[in-house]
Image: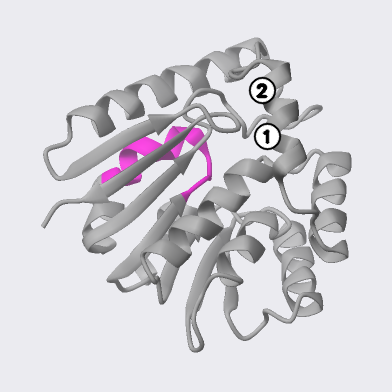
């Protein structure tokens, strides 16, 4: 994949970032080693900042992985804040729970196990922030429901909108799967850009991030 940002710029910005603590660094290393999707460091920090900026008390995330992004979100929550995060792979969900416990975030982060297409109908809004980082084929079909779960002026963050970040080497890493994911993302981006319920900005952060604010 061609980098979205020049290496010199990326390296400069990386040098400004605060070092991650041992738990975050280990979770990210383990995710990369196991081929489990995890957002880039700048994307994860963007989630933290957005959560803090809107003073989110309730966050819903699709695509837990090993908990890397969820840890950034949960650390930005106020006392009593809650993160509900969905992971379709039981083994990944179990490790994510362990990582949340090690980080002292077990009270804030609650992992739901199963497909997002089913579990999304079992949660009740409104949410202040929703993070969409699941199966790219589900992005567009779930959009209307996720918007309905957002409070007015709530924020929907969609990751990998410039790349199919759900491809795991050795599983579905085929040209056909990649193209299907890319086509799904393009349709989704078009929907975001034209949806009258949302104000959306597309950012070249990580593998591409769309930040959408629900209109009143």
Where, by quadrant of the figure, is residue 123 drawn? bottom left
**Circle 2/circle 1 CB separation < 8 Å:** yes
Residue 209 covered by magenta stretch = no
**As drawn, 156 above or below 15:** below
How crowded is the residue under tag 2: few (<14 C-alpha within 10 Å), some, or many (20+)? Answer: few
* Residue located beneath label 1 in the image: 13
Left or right of 87? Residue 132 is: left
**Going 55% across and 59% down the picture, which residue do you hit?**
48
Quadrant containing the N terminus is top right
| Left or right: 124, with 84 as reference point | left
Write down the region rendered in magenta. Answer: 132-143
Residue matched to label 2: 9
Query: Can you see residue 141?
Result: yes
Residue at 71% from the left image edge and 42% from the top image edge? 16
Q: Position of residue 189 (x, y in %)?
A: 34, 27
Note whether residue 37 is visible: no
For residue 69, which quarter of the picture? Answer: bottom right
Q: Residue at x 77, y 38 (%)?
A: 15
């Amino acid at each position: 994949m061609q980098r979205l940002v020049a290496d010199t710029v990326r390296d400069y910005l990386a040098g400004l970032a605060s070092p991650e603590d041992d738990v975050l660094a280990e979770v990210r290393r383990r995710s990369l080693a196991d081929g489990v999707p995890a957002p880039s460091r700048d994307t994860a920090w963007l989630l933290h900042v957005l959560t803090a900026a809107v003073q989110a008390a309730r966050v819903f995330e699709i695509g837990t992985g090993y908990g890397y992004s969820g840890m950034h979100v949960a650390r930005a929550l106020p006392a009593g804040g809650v993160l509900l995060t969905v992971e379709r792979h039981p083994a990944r969900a179990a490790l994510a729970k362990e990582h949340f416990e090690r980080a002292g975030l077990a009270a804030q982060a609650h992992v739901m196990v199963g497909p997002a297409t089913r579990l999304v109908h079992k949660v009740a809004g409104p949410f202040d922030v929703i993070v969409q980082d699941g199966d790219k084929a589900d992005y567009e079909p779930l959009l209307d429901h996720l918007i309905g779960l957002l409070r007015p002026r709530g924020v929907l963050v969609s990751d990998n909108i410039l790349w199919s970040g759900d491809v795991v080497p050795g599983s579905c890493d085929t040209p056909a799967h990649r193209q299907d994911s890319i086509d799904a993302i393009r349709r989704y981006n078009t929907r975001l850009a034209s949806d009258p319920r949302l104000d959306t900005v597309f950012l070249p952060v990580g593998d591409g991030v769309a930040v959408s604010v629900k209109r009143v």
